[in-house]
Image (spheres, rainbow, N blue to C red):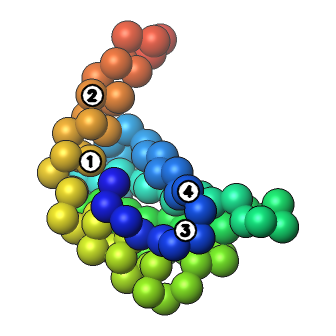
Amino acid sequence: MSKISEGGEINMTYSGILHDKNGERFVRIRFERETRSGNVSYAEAIVPSGKITANEGFDQDEIRRMADYLKENKEDIMSKAFKISSFMHIFKTE
């Protein structure tokens, strides 16, 4: 991941492929960072739009860099999320 923050390690997790009410594919993203005081800062986003949908504890510059990162890497993120979704079908029961 490119440098997003000066304030500690940021972890990014993502869902498999999801579908909105129109059938469009998207992936939910969550960035988290533990602060020095032990609190957790987080931001949630959607790919492929790169839109940040929630934020607690990140400043506006960090949010902008997260959105830029998501837009620049949306194809890779979508591809990895697709692999998760494909793998999860093995466990799906009817």
Disc 4: which residue: 9
Identify the amino acid type marked 1: Ile
Look at 36% across and 76% down and name the residue there. Answer: 65
User: Quarter-wise, where is residue 39 in the image?
Assistant: bottom right
Residue 1 is left or right of residue 23, and the answer is: right
Q: CA distance from mark 3 to mark 4?
A: 14 Å
Question: Where residue 7 appears, x then y in whole percent?
Answer: 59, 70
**Element under disc 1:** helix
Residue under the point 43% across and 54% down: 28
Residue 23 can be seen in this image: no
At numbered mark 3, what does the secondary structure look like: helix, strand or loop?
strand
Residue under pointer 3:
43
Q: Position of residue 12 (x, y in %)?
A: 47, 51
**Residue occupied by mark 1:** 77
Q: Amino acid at mark 2?
A: Lys
Q: Do the CB atoms of the residues marked 4 and 2 lie less than 8 Å apart? A: no
Disc 3 and disc 1: Cα gap in Å? Answer: 16 Å
> Secondary structure beneath disc 2?
helix
Q: Nearer the viewer, residue 1 or 29?
A: 1
The mark closer to the camera, 4 or 2, is 4
Label 2 neighbour load within 10 Å: few <14, some 14-19, many 20+: few
Along the line of sight, the residue nearer the viewer: 67 or 78: 67
Q: Earlier in the sequence, mark 4 or mark 1?
A: 4
Q: Counting residues from the N terminus, which is met first, the one under dot 3 or under dot 1? A: 3
